[in-house]
Amino acid sequence: MATKDQHLALSSGLGLAGIAVSNFWDCGSEAMNTFKEDIIISILKPNKETAIHHYLNFFQNIEEEVDMMWKNTDLDEAYEFIFRTLEEVKLKPDLPEPNFESCEEDCGHFDCECNEIVMQWIAYVSKNLDEIDKLIKHSAFQFIFQDRNFLHNFHIELANLIEREMNYIKANYPEFVTAKNKLRRKTFPVWLKQAVFYRDKGTCAICRCDLSNLVRTQNTIHIDHIVPLELFGTNDASNMQLLCETCNTSKGARSTATSSINVPYWNL
């Protein structure tokens, strides 16, 4: 099957990813509790909208960002932010653009045509905020999914939430819980296997052996839970890594071993 190419709002996504990662130790637990129900639903079986996406909800609110800029910066700066963001997410509207340079209002554009035009852009953002936020979160996830070390830390914290909420999960979603009060293992869908293989470049995350099997099919591919189900890990799609059979067997159900090793572009 051919790869489905897609436009990504990488600049906005990178900004959101940076905020989410750098504030994890201060806000991670609060964010998970804020979106607890959404997160629980996403981790019962692999979903493309992962627990990471719901965590990003805690930081991403384009309407709040625009409102803050409109109230605390010059109107032209607020408009430039709106324009750049909408252009990047490919949702630029067919609206008139303000001409600040020719405007005779020089005291903040409170009572001029520029103000009226920018209000139309702000209203457009409010009308489309769910789609804008969704596209930015989707782009931010592309960065975060590359960082297995962060995924490890995130899912350790998530495991603490799952352990605390296991009675609730068992009561509301009993078919997903084992007799030992752990989440039941679910089949890995093809899209997840392909995504993990692509992210980890066909290489075991721990021993770095080649799993592409282009020359010899000597290594067996394993999709591994970074934080095992036995340790209250989840079936969330962001809790997976590529391992060879030897590393997966030795890692077992009590280890959260992973690696942040990668190949920098200049090292190729």
Image (cartoon, rainbow, N blue to C red):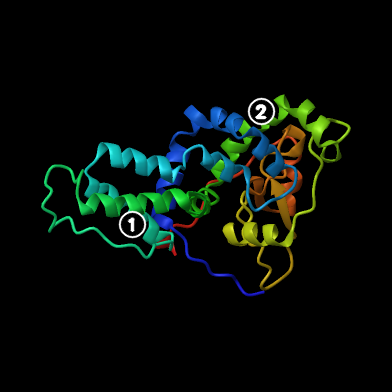
Q: Nearer the viewer, residue 197 or 36?
A: 36
Rendering coords of residue 68 (x, y %): 33, 38
Amino acid at pointer 1? Arg
Is residue 155 in view? yes
Which quarter of the rendered picture does the N terminus lie within?
Answer: bottom right
Residue at x-position 43% and y-position 63%: 90
Which quarter of the rendered picture does the C terminus lie within?
Answer: bottom left
Mark 2 neighbour density, 10 Å: few (under 14) some (14–19) many (20 or more):
some
Q: Nearer the viewer, residue 21 or 114?
A: 114
Residue 64 in which image quadrant: top left
How much space separates mark 2 and mark 1, taking CA atoms? 39 Å
Rendering coords of residue 18 (x, y %): 42, 43
Of the numbered discs 2 and 1, the one sitting upstream in the chain is 1
Residue 121 in which image quadrant: bottom left
Please tell me whether mark 1 sits on a helix, a strand or a loop.
helix
Judged from this view, the residue extending furthest toward the right is 179
Residue at x-position 65% and y-position 39%: 38
Residue at x-position 28% and y-position 55%: 117
Please tell me whether mark 2 sits on a helix, a strand or a loop.
helix
120 relative position to 233: left or right: left
Amino acid at pointer 2? Asn
Do the CB atoms of the residues marked 2 and 1 lie less than 8 Å apart?
no
- Closer to the eye: label 2 or 1: 1
Rendering coords of residue 82 (x, y %): 34, 52
Residue at x-position 71% and y-position 50%: 46
190 relative position to 155: left or right: right
Rendering coords of residue 243 (x, y %): 68, 52
Q: Of the numbered discs in the image, which one, if any, rests on residue 84?
A: 1
Is residue 80 in view? no
- The correct choice, above or below, for 66 with respect to 96 in the image is above
Q: Which residue is mark 2?
A: 160
